[in-house]
Image: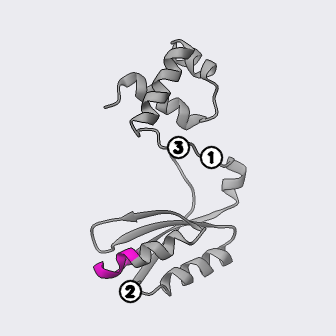
Amino acid sequence: MTTQADRALIALLRENARASTAELARRLGVSRTTVQSRIERLERQGVIAGYGVKLSPEHERNLVKAHILVTVPPKQSAAVAAALRGMAEVRTLHSVSGNFDMIIVVEAPSVADLDLVIDRIGALDGVERTLSSIILSTRIDR
């Protein structure tokens, strides 16, 4: 279970996973040793599973993003998920309840490229139906 102090540390690491231990300690008002110990404990517990890259807003603005809702028969979900895992344009795959079985978040460098990605997803064995929504803007991104 994470403490309020752990959540504050995680929030700072989400802002900048490359921040130095000294910077994190200064912003949290604790010692560097405390920060290092918390990070090591959170990694050991599996709370922090790794560190990633956050792209610049300039680069992100040039990408066309969409949510693709997909209907898949239950017996084919694993195969469809495996095929989607192999597509570099797929950023996130959610299994959901409701009229659709999956929501896929994709990104491409242009509308034409996005159209090709949507066609490729629709052509996968097991995909029965898709519904796409292009993301026009992002109002909150934490």
Label 2, on which residue? 128
80 above or below 140? below
Disc 2 is placed on an element classified as loop
Amino acid type indicated by mark 3:
Gly
Q: How far across and down, in percent of the image, does residue 96 sit?
A: 32, 65
Cβ atoms at labels 1 and 3 below 8 Å apart: no
Amino acid type indicated by mark 2:
Glu
Q: Can residue 91 be seen at all in this image of the molecule?
A: yes
Disc 3 is placed on an element classified as loop
**Circle number at residue 50:** 3
Disc 1 is placed on an element classified as loop
The region drawn magenta spans 70-78
| Of callouts 2 and 1, the N-terminal one | 1
Q: How far across and down, in percent of the image, does residue 137 sit?
A: 57, 56
The CA distance from mark 2 to mark 3 is 35 Å
Answer with the quarter of the image where residue 63 lies: bottom right
Q: How far across and down, in percent of the image, does residue 68 sit?
A: 47, 72
Answer with the quarter of the image where residue 26 lies: top right
The CA distance from mark 2 to mark 1 is 34 Å
**Which residue is at a point 50% across and 73% down the rendered structure image?**
84
**Which residue is at a point 70% across and 60% down the rendered structure image?**
62
Label 1, on which residue? 54
Q: How far across and down, in percent of the image, does residue 119 sit?
A: 55, 84
